[in-house]
Image (cartoon, rainbow, N blue to C red):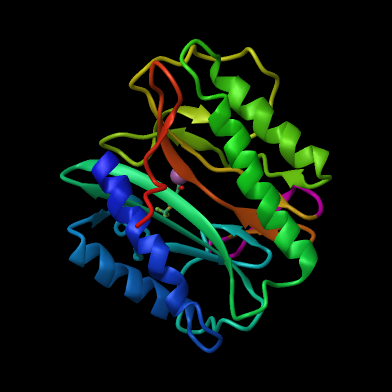
């Protein structure tokens, strides 16, 4: 899993090179598919439930998660783009998502703040991923960080256990009271993925039955890391940097 995370981290380190105004989200997905092949990684989303046909989810602006790459979706300067990729190396998975702004500008400052809080919420969650803690200590830490910034925490999707499968038990909610759920033990692997909004946390599913947007049209951010619980600090396996 660490090796899967390391390789995925490499790909994310250069993905911004294809996030240009005028590119389509399908172009970006094709670029990622090529990289996965080069890095000997197998997509866990392509063929998912026999329904999904892409190696990434690319969710722009008010799309929270599960944006479907499309040749009709043309990126524009300032767009807030969340890219989510899960892939395995020799059968072991890593799941990762990052948020980017298209172009030189970093988007409206409010969008920038939203993304900063998504990352800080992820970090707060990771900081609670300690052996002996309860699972929901992670959830509560994420919610607290997001709501302290007056942003919304999406309730309809969650992080998850991960291993040979992309989605394993337990579900890792991004909200809730601390001190609940299973005790964390060394060796457990989790994908933590706060999904946050600038307005209401309510979402709506598009007619495609897949894409999740904010109900009120507000901007959304989503970031994700795969971590492993250890005897000491959690190991974040999707943050390899060159
Ligand atoms: N990678 C996503 C996650 O973070 C799930 C992908 S959904 C799929 O859990 F439809 F693309 F497979
Ligand atoms: Co995930």
93 vs 119, nearest the viewer: 119
User: Residue 212 is drawn in which quadrant?
Assistant: bottom right
Residue displayed at 19% across by 66% down: 38
Q: How many marks?
A: 0
Task: Give the quadrant of residue 71.
Answer: bottom left
Q: Nearer the viewer, residue 227 or 218?
A: 227
State whether residue 152 is above or below residue 22.
above
| Left or right: where 226 falls relative to 1 | right
Whole-percent x and y of residue 149?
81, 44
Residue appearing at x 38%, y 21% in the figure: 230
- Rendered residue at 44%/28% (across/down): 234
Against 48, residue 189 (above or below) is above
- Which of the image's four quarters has the N terminus? top left
Split into 4 quadrants, where in the image is the C terminus? bottom left
- The answer to whether residue 149 is left or right of residue 195 is right
Residue sitting at the far front: 242
* Residue 168 visible in the displayed image: yes
Residue 53 on image: x %, y %: 34, 65
Residue 157 among those drawn in magenta: no
Magenta-highlighted residues: 199-211
Q: Which x, y percent locates residue 34?
A: 25, 72
Position of residue 39 measured from the top left corner of the image (x, y, whole percent):
21, 60
- Examine the structure image and report whether residue 210 is included in the region drawn in magenta: yes
Q: Which corner quadrant of the figure contains ligand 2?
A: top left
From the viewer's perspective, is 103 left or right of 3?
right
Give the main secondary structure, helix, strand or loop, of the magenta stretch. loop
Q: Left or right: where does residue 59 sit relative to residue 144?
A: left
Residue, far bottom: 22
> Does residue 204 show up?
no
- Along the line of sight, which residue is nearer the eye, 172 or 6? 6
């Amino acid at each position: 899993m660490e090796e899967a995370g390391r390789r995925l981290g490499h790909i994310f380190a250069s993905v911004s090179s294809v996030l240009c105004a005028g590119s389509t989200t399908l172009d970006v997905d094709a670029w990622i598919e090529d990289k996965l092949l080069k890095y000997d990684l197998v997509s866990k989303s392509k063929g998912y439930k026999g329904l999904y046909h892409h190696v990434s989810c690319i969710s722009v602006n008010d799309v929270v998660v599960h944006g479907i790459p499309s040749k009709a979706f043309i990126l524009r300067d300032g767009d807030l783009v969340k890219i989510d990729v899960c892939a395995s190396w020799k059968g072991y998975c890593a799941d990762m998502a990052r948020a980017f702004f298209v172009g030189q500008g970093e988007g409206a400052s409010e969008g920038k703040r939203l993304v900063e809080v998504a990352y800080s919420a992820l970090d707060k969650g990771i900081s609670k991923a300690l052996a002996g803690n309860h699972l929901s200590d992670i959830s509560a830490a994420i919610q607290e960080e997001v709501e302290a910034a007056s942003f919304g925490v999406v309730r309809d999707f969650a992080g998850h256990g991960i291993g040979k499968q992309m989605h394993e038990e337990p579900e890792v909610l991004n909200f809730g009271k601390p001190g609940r759920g299973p005790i964390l033990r060394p060796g457990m692997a989790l994908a933590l993925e706060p999904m946050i909004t600038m307005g209401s946390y309510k979402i709506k599913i598009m007619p495609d039955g897949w894409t999740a947007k904010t109900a009120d049209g507000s901007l959304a951010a989503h970031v994700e890391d795969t971590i492993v619980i250890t005897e000491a600090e959690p190991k974040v396996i999707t943050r390899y940097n060159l």
